[in-house]
Amino acid sequence: MSLASELAYEALVSDILSGAYPMGHRIREEEVAARVGTSRTPVREALRRLNAEGLVDLQPHRGAVVQTAMYQIEELYELRALLEGYGAAQAAGRRAEADLVELGELCDSMDAVVDRGEDVGELTALNLAFHRQVQVAAGIDRIVGALPGLTVRPLVRETFRHYTPQELARSMRQHRELVEAIAAGDGEWARSVMSAHIYAGRAALLRRQKEASGGAAGSGLSGAR
């Protein structure tokens, strides 16, 4: 994706997740292009990417229409807490050494990215890999198959982008505690940590939406050195 497309994509994700573009809103390519300072072609590329990620619907004769509302996003977090919490409990029951090693290494990699304070995209990818690995460790294929449909990558990335340093540090600690719970074979501990972790992410996103609607600025990853 070109730099212009990436800029358009970031602007659109921010508008959708902040509520500036509500569900059903028709996105006008020319308006986005003028705001970002590019032609309409990069905007179309960004919209195709958002369509593939489930945030907009490309409709004949109407163009791109936002198809994700905040209440749907909240429901996604509810479903994730139930599904991933169950998976974490099952992973604790299995306690496979190879899975524990992989989860520990992912924690190390995420901590290194946070220490550098420079790459939200890399942190997002590692976080998604961590959550998927927990479900792989559960040994239940249907959970692994369902997870990508519930974990919207732009949502995770936007949440990380606007975490306060305290929220980011808490998220990293929860990853470590989850690995400890799985290693201890304590299913209820693992379930509760995973659920709390997901609900904390939802709370951070809702705070970000409230700040955006009120004109306040969020805190980025770069502040969490």
Image: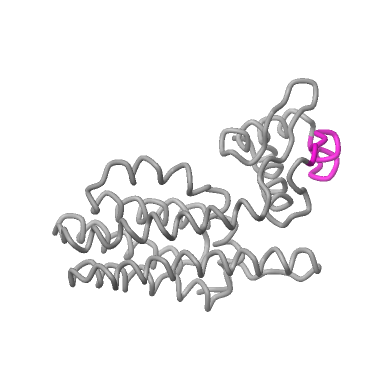
- Taking 204 as reference, is 61 left or right? right
In this view, 2 is above or below 195? above
Does residue 30 appear left or right of residue 153 in this picture? right
Q: Is residue 217 left or right of residue 200?
A: right
Q: Position of residue 175 (x, y in %)?
A: 36, 68
42 magenta-colored? no
Image quarter in which the N terminus is found: top right
Corner quadrant of residue 207: bottom right
Q: How is the image coloured?
A: one colour
Return the x and y of residue 187 as percentages of the image width and height. Answer: 24, 67
Residue drawn at the location 30% of the way across and 68% of the way down: 190
Q: Position of residue 142 (x, y in %)?
A: 32, 41
User: Looking at the rendering, which quadrant does residue 160 occupy?
Assistant: bottom right
- Furthest residue toward top: 60
When the figure is inspected, residue 128 is found, relative to residue 112, above or below; the finding is above
- Residue in the image at 16% along x and 58% along y: 94
Along the line of sight, which residue is nearer the eye, 26 or 9? Answer: 26
Q: Give 66 or 2, whichever is nearer the viewer.
A: 66
Q: Nearer the viewer, residue 98 or 25?
A: 25
What segment is highlighted magenta in the picture?
25-38
Which residue reaches farthest left? 97
**Does 29 appear in magenta?**
yes
Number of numbered labels in the structure image: 0
Q: Nearer the viewer, residue 48 or 148?
A: 148
Does residue 159 lie above or below 171 as drawn?
Answer: above
- At x 15%, y 57%, the residue is 96
Is residue 24 depicted above or below 102 in this figure? Answer: above
